[in-house]
C-alpha cells in the first residue's frame, strides 16, 4: 500500500460520496420524475448530463489510444468526427420534435407514429439488447479500474460499482441520474484536461493543448518515419478513403439513433430547451473531444521518446507495472537488450490502446494526485453511461412492455415499482455478464452504432419529416436495414464467420451507412406504393412540427 | 353573418399560410446547416485532406487539424446558430410555446 494507493482511494471515496448524497437528495415518486426527471432540467445542466451520459469508459480511457496507436494519427478522426458530428443530426433533425412528442421512450414514438404495438415491441427489444450489451462493458470497466488502482478483486470492484449505480438509479430514476451525471461530468472533464495541460506545457511551453498539439504532431511525422510507421498526420494509413467516409457516417447516424442518447432530450423543459440542450451537450463533449487528439499526440511522442532504443534494464517504473498487467509487453527478439519499437516484424513492444490515458501522467512524470484524479474520472465516465443505459432498459421494460402489453391498467405506483425492479434486474444481469464477459460483447458494442444507424435513425427522421411515410414502409425499411447490416457484420467481421469484407472492401464498421441508405430508399418507395397514413396521423405529425400545440382557442 | 365570417376565414387562411411558411423556413435553415455540416465533416476533413495537408497551420498540416479539431468547432457553432435562428423563427411566426 503506497501513497499512490491512498491518494487514489481518497479521490474515489470523495466522488462516490457526492454521488450518494445526490441520490438521497433527488428521490422521486412519479413515473414522469422517474422516466424524464419531470421534464424540468435546465438546458445547461441537461447538456452536461447528456455529455456524461454519452462519454463512456471508451471515450475516456480508450479513444486517445485508438487514435495514437490503432489508427496511427489522422485516421483516428473517424471517432472524433463520428462521435461529435452525430450531435448536429440529433439537434437539428430529432431533438426538438421528439421533445414536442413528449412521451417517455423511443419505442413509444415508433409505436405511436406508425400505429403499431408490434413495431413498438420490436423497438423495445432492440433498445434493451443494444443497451444491455453496451452496459456490460461499462460495469466491466469499473471492475478493472478498481482492481488495478485499489488492489481489490475485480468481483469486489464490480460489486461496489453496481451498488452505487443501483442506489441512485432506483431512488432517483432519471432525476437522480441527471444530477449525478452533472457531478460526474465535472469530475471526468477535469481529470481529462489536467494531464493534457501539464504534459503540453512541459513539451511546448503552451498550456492550451488544443493549440500546442499541432506542433508535436508535426514533429511526430519525422520521428515515425524513422521508425517505419506512416506519417502521423497523413490520412488513410490504416483505412481506405471510402472506409474513413463510411465509418464516420455510420458513427454519426448511429449516435443520433442510440436510444440512451435520444431519451435525454425528453427531459428538457420545452422545445426551446431541447434545442439548447443539444448545443450545450456538444459544447461539453467538444471540450473532451478536442483535447483527445492532443493527449494522443503527446502520449505517442512521450512513449517513443522514452522507450525507443532504451535499454530494457533501465526502463521507468510505470513500464514494469503495466507489464505486470499484460497490457504492455516487450519481447527482445534480437537479444540486444534494447527496446525496438518499429513498424514490421522487428517490432519488440506491444502497447494496448486502453492504457495510454491511464499511463500518460506516469509516462510524463506528473505528480501522484493526477493519477488519482484520472482514475476517479474514468470511474465517473463508466458509471454515468452505465446509469443512463440502465434507465433506458428499465423504462422499456416497465413502460413499453409491462404497461403496454402485460398490465394496461397498471397504476402509477405499480409501473414505478416495475421500473425500479427493472433497474435492479439490469444491474445484476450486467454485473454477472461483466464478471465473465462473453467474447462477443466487444464486437457487438462496436457494431451497435451501425445497427442503430440502419434501423432507428431513418425511421424516426422520416416519421417527422415525411408525412407520407406509413407503417408498411417503415416496417419494410427498418427490417431491410437491420437484416442487411446484421448479415454483413456476421459474415464479414473478424471473429464471426470471417469471410472478410466482401462488398467493395467495405469495413463491417462502416456498413451501417449502406444499411441506412437502403432503409431510407425502401421506406420512401414502399410508403408511396401503399395507402397514405390516416388524417389523424397527418395531424399527429403536424403537431410535432410546431412548438405550440394548435388548439381551438388559436 | 357573412361580414363576420369573412375576416375570420381570412385569418384562418393566413394562419395556415403562416404555418406552411414557418415549416419552409425551418427546412431551409436545417438544409443549409446540414450542407455546412457535410462540407466540414466530409469534404474538408476527408475528401480534401491530402491536398489541405500541404498547408501549414499552428505548426502542423491543415487537413489534419480540420479532421481532428476544426470540424468539431464547426459542429458546435452549427448547433448554436440553429438554436438562435429557430428560437427567433418560432417568435416571428408566432408558433412558440
Image (cartoon, coloured by chain):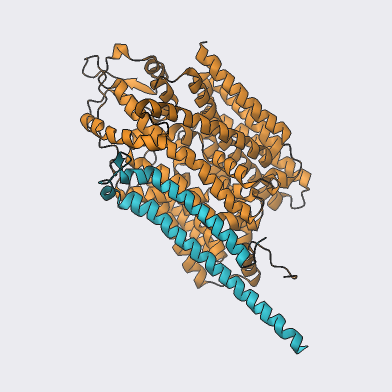
Chain colours: A orange, B cyan
**x and y, in percent, of residue A325 in the image:** 42, 20
Q: Is residue A488 visible?
A: no
Q: Is residue A226 visible?
A: yes
Q: Nearer the viewer, residue B32 or A398?
A: B32
Q: Establish if A375 lies above or below A445.
A: above
Q: Nearer the viewer, residue A440 or A161?
A: A161
For residue A338, side relative to residue A14 (left or right): left
Residue drawn at the location 57% of the way across and 33% of the way down: A186
Q: Nearer the viewer, residue A358 or A217?
A: A217
Outermost residue, front side: A205
Quarter residue A395 falls in:
top right
**x and y, in percent, of residue A368 in the image:** 48, 18
Quarter residue A66 falls in:
top left
Quarter residue A304 falls in:
top left
Q: Establish if A342 lies above or below A507.
A: above
**x and y, in percent, of residue A12 in the image:** 58, 23
Residue drawn at the location 76% of the way across and 41% of the way down: A29
Amino acid at each position: 500500500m503506497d501513497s499512490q494507493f491512498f491518494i487514489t482511494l481518497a479521490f474515489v471515496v470523495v466522488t462516490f460520496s457526492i454521488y450518494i448524497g445526490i441520490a438521497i437528495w433527488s428521490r422521486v415518486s412519479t413515473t414522469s420524475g422517474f422516466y424524464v426527471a419531470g421534464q424540468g432540467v435546465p438546458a445547461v445542466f441537461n447538456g452536461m448530463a447528456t455529455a456524461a451520459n454519452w462519454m463512456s469508459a471508451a471515450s475516456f480511457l480508450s479513444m486517445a489510444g485508438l487514435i495514437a496507436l490503432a489508427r496511427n494519427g489522422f485516421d483516428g478522426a473517424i471517432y472524433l468526427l463520428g462521435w461529435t458530428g452525430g450531435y448536429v443530426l440529433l439537434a437539428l433533425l430529432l431533438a426538438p420534435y421528439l421533445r414536442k412528442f413528449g412521451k417517455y421512450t423511443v419505442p413509444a414514438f415508433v409505436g405511436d407514429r406508425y400505429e403499431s404495438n408490434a413495431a413498438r415491441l420490436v423497438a423495445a427489444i432492440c433498445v434493451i439488447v443494444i443497451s444491455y450489451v453496451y452496459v456490460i462493458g461499462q460495469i466491466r470497466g469499473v471492475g478493472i479500474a478498481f482492481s488495478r488502482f485499489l488492489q481489490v478483486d475485480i468481483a469486489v470492484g464490480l460489486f461496489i460499482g453496481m451498488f452505487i449505480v443501483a442506489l441512485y438509479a432506483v431512488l432517483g430514476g432519471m432525476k437522480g441520474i441527471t444530477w449525478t451525471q452533472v457531478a460526474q461530468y465535472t469530475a471526468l472533464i477535469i481529470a481529462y484536461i489536467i494531464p493534457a495541460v501539464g504534459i503540453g506545457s512541459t513539451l511546448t511551453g503552451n498550456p492550451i493543448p488544443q493549440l500546442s498539439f499541432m506542433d508535436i504532431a508535426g514533429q511526430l511525422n519525422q520521428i515515425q518515419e524513422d521508425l517505419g510507421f506512416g506519417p502521423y498526420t497523413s490520412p488513410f494509413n490504416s483505412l481506405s478513403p471510402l472506409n474513413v467516409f463510411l465509418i464516420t457516417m455510420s458513427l454519426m447516424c448511429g449516435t443520433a439513433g442510440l436510444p440512451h442518447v435520444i431519451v435525454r432530450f425528453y427531459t428538457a423543459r420545452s422545445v426551446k430547451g431541447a434545442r439548447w440542450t443539444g448545443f450545450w451537450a456538444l459544447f461539453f463533449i467538444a471540450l473532451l473531444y478536442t483535447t483527445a487528439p492532443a493527449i494522443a499526440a503527446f502520449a505517442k511522442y512521450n512513449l517513443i521518446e522514452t522507450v525507443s532504443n532504451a535499454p530494457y534494464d533501465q526502463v521507468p517504473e510505470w513500464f514494469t507495472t503495466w507489464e505486470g498487467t499484460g497490457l504492455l509487453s516487450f519481447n527482445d527478439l534480437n537479444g540486444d537488450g534494447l527496446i525496438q519499437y518499429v513498424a514490421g516484424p522487428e517490432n519488440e513492444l506491444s502497447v494496448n490502446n486502453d492504457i495510454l490515458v491511464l499511463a500518460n501522467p506516469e509516462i510524463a512524470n506528473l505528480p501522484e494526485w493526477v493519477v488519482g484524479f484520472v482514475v476517479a474520472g474514468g470511474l465517473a465516465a463508466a458509471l454515468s453511461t452505465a446509469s443512463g443505459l440502465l434507465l433506458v432498459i428499465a423504462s422499456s421494460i416497465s413502460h413499453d412492455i409491462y404497461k403496454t402489453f402485460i398490465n394496461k391498467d397498471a397504476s402509477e405506483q405499480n409501473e414505478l415499482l416495475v421500473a425500479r425492479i427493472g433497474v435492479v434486474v439490469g444491474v445484476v444481469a450486467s454485473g454477472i455478464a461483466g464478471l465473465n464477459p462473453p467474447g462477443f460483447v466487444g464486437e457487438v458494442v462496436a457494431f451497435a452504432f451501425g445497427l442503430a444507424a440502419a434501423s432507428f435513425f431513418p425511421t424516426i427522421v422520416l416519421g417527422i419529416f415525411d408525412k407520407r411515410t406509413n407503417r408498411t414502409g417503415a416496417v419494410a425499411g427498418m427490417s431491410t436495414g437491420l437484416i442487411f447490416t446484421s448479415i454483413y457484420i456476421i459474415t464479414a467481421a473478424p471473429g464471426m464467420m470471417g469471410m472478410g469484407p466482401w462488398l467493395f472492401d467495405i469495413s463491417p464498421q462502416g456498413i451501417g451507412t449502406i444499411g441506412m441508405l437502403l432503409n431510407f430508399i425502401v421506406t420512401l418507395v414502399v410508403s408511396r406504393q401503399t395507402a397514405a397514413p390516416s388524417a389523424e396521423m397527418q395531424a399527429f405529425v403536424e403537431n410535432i412540427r410546431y412548438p405550440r400545440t394548435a388548439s381551438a382557442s388559436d | 353573418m357573412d361580414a363576420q365570417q369573412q375576416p375570420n376565414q381570412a385569418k384562418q387562411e393566413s394562419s395556415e399560410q403562416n404555418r406552411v411558411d414557418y415549416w419552409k423556413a425551418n427546412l431551409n435553415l436545417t438544409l443549409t446547416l446540414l450542407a455546412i455540416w457535410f462540407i466540414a465533416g466530409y469534404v474538408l476533413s476527408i475528401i480534401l485532406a491530402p491536398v489541405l495537408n500541404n498547408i501549414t497551420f499552428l505548426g502542423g498540416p491543415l487537413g489534419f487539424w480540420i479532421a481532428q479539431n476544426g470540424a468539431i468547432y464547426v459542429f458546435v457553432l452549427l448547433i448554436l446558430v440553429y438554436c438562435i435562428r429557430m428560437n427567433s423563427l418560432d417568435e416571428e411566426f408566432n408558433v412558440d410555446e
